[in-house]
Image: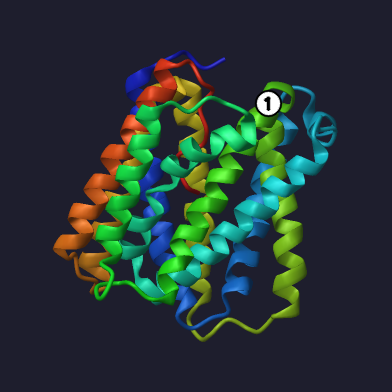
Amino acid sequence: MTRPDTRKGIACMIAATLVFSVQDALSRHLGETNNVFVIVMIRYWFFAAFVVALALKAPGGLGRALRPRFPVIQVLRGVMLVAEICIMVVAFVKLGLVATHAVFTCFPLLVAALSGPVLGEYVGWRRWTAVAVGLVGVLVILQPGGGVLSLWSVLPFAAALLFALYGLLTRYVAAEDGAAVSFFWAGTSGAVAITMLGLWFWEPLSEGSWPWMAALCVTGIIGHWCMIRAYDYAEASAIQPFSFLQLVWASIIGVAFLGESLTANVVIGAGIVVAAGLFTLWRADKKGEAPTPVARP
């Protein structure tokens, strides 16, 4: 058993958000010249191999992972996650890393809003107020009448909705299936779903793409390893707030390496959304609710 160490947990979470941001930049680069479904399919093959390797080392081995208490929900979680990733990659290409992540950051607010109808939890007026404030922040980012607002702007919000539902379902199955089983099914069922779609749209990767594809797969494994270690070292409530650094890293990478711009409305709107999101996490922790995933893989 890993010895608790909050500082190491925080460091691992910060590393995970940085690696996942690099992964998103690689996804955007590959998505500009390749079919998105094919990219995500190849990425998921490596992800599935990683989760199978982890399951073999976990208590009960692969046999325990193959006997989930909620098989239908586990499969649904996996499909939701891979669909969210596909949508995000398209959004990276159409909107860029900065705008996409700025809008996607609202997903903790969606978790708070949906925890009532999905899990039957009570959501008080304070968190409903935070949700409303956060949605105002999203409108500031999208800047109706200009800015990044377009039909493509729906994509990161749709991805945030899917990831929020994925997180809530993860919380629902956690008591019976545990993190190792849920992680296994997120990888394997997602791999099966995207393979069925990816093979239908199969086309060879564009010239020079394979080194970038290899880097994408490697960063995915490293990022997940860092995130797992973060939760091994520290309580979720201690490291959750640091997941918002993914927006910071993505913005730095987008501006410095991808030629994206950081406009005032995106900075102000993202700040409002992050502040509202942090408040909802604080209220959930204060009320003793089980944590939901907050770092997007």
Q: Give the x, y percent position of residue 289.
A: 51, 21
User: Callout 1: helix, strand or loop?
Assistant: helix
> Of 211 and 154, which appears nearest the observer?
154
From this viewpoint, is residue 270 visible?
A: yes
Q: Residue at x 31, y 64 (%)?
A: 99
Query: Is 241 positioned to the left or the right of 228 in the image?
Result: left
Q: Residue at x 52, y 68 (%)?
A: 213
Amino acid on which disc 1 is placed: Gly
List the residue tagged with mark 1: 178
Q: Give the x, y percent position of residue 16.
A: 41, 42
Q: Give the x, y percent position of residue 167.
A: 57, 39
Task: Say if 297 sits above or below 172 in the image.
Answer: below
Query: Is 89 positioned to the left or the right of 141 in the image?
Result: right
Q: Residue at x 34, y 36 (%)?
A: 129
> Of 82 and 115, which appears nearest the observer?
115
Q: Residue at x 68, y 49 (%)?
A: 78
